[in-house]
Image (tube, coloured by chain):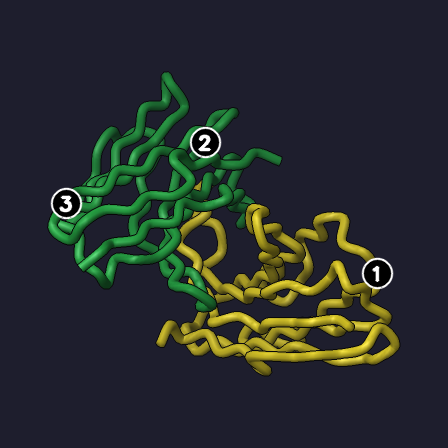
Chain colours: A yellow, B green
Amino acid sequence: ETGVTQTPRHLVMGMTNKKSLKCEQHLGHNAMYWYKQSAKKPLELMFVYNFKEQTENNSVPSRFSPECPNSSHLFLHLHTLQPEDSALYLCASSHPTSGTNTGELFFGEGSRLTVL
Amino acid sequence: SQQGEEDPQALSIQEGENATMNCSYKTSINNLQWYRQNSGRGLVHLILIRSNEREKHSGRLRVTLDTSKKSSSLLITASRAADTASYFCATDAGGNNRLAFGKGNQVVVIP
């Protein structure tokens, strides 16, 4: 148990569906992240939030829409996805950057998304 | 963005043997981190080494960092079946909560 909880663990959706992934952390962190993990590819950073403000959008298509209502919760809203968006979506949290160093990330177990 | 690149990609060893993985990167870094991922699970942080450190130990793990060669190695001593996992290096090149991950090393420890 890492203190970062993701739901649902598995999601199957059609290309016209709208769904959301949820992440909650109980670690008192102020930075939260979405990463995408596809087979045979490195983890891709999608979004970063610091103190509820989005500080990174790594050229992610608009069909992925993040929301961070408070420092403990992070959502990823999904709409009109493509089959190539099927992947493991990982949420992580950390303390904000200290000086010039990014510290340890605490990951959730991931949400396995399949787009039909 | 910068990425770590692990080498070798897949490693199969007998229980009790040592496992060594390497990671190379392209630009200057603030720190380098190693993570482990069991199949279908999230990543777990193992160790962080700062750019001014050359070696660090944590239990059966030993990490080295050579900034002149832009490379790092992770050594797992006396491996156990439970060490079977994928291992990733991640580099922090400029703070801002941005870590760039490599593709990962798959390690299989045979009992």
**Quick one: label 3, few (<14), some, or many (20+) residues within 10 Å?**
some
- Report whether mark 3 lies on the same chain as mark 1: no
* Secondary structure beneath label 3: loop
Q: Are marks 3 and 1 in contact (CB under 8 Å)?
A: no
- Image quadrant in which the C terminus of chain B is located: bottom left
Query: Residue at horizontal 43%, vertical 29%?
Result: B24
Secondary structure of the residue carrying numbered label 2: loop
Q: Secondary structure at mark 1?
A: loop
User: Could you tell me how far apart the alpha carbons at marks 2 and 3 are, in whole angstroms?
Assistant: 31 Å
Mark 3 or mark 1, which is nearer to you? 3
Instruction: Answer with left or right where residue B111 lies relative to residue B4.
Output: left
Asked whether the residues under marks 2 and 3 belong to the same chain, the reply is: yes
**Pointer 1 and pointer 2 on the same chain:** no
Name which residue type carries label 2: Ile
Identify whether B97 is placed above or below B102: below
Report whether B45 appears left or right of A29.
Answer: left
**Mark 2 — residue?**
B29
Comparing B111 with B78, the one in front is: B111
Query: Which is nearer the eye, B87 or B90?
Result: B87
Q: Is residue A49 above or below residue B69?
A: below
Chain identifier of the residue bearing label 1 in the image: A
Image coords of residue B62 (percent x, y): 20, 41
Amino acid residing under circle 3: Glu
Viewer-nearest residue: A51 or A45: A45
Q: Residue under circle 3? A: B17
Mark nearest the camera among 2 and 3 is 3
Which mark is in front, 1 or 2?
1
Residue at 36% across / 47% down in the picture? Answer: B34
**x%, y% of residue A50?**
59, 60
Q: Callout 1, which amino acid?
A: Ser
Q: Position of residue A8 (x, y in %)?
A: 59, 82
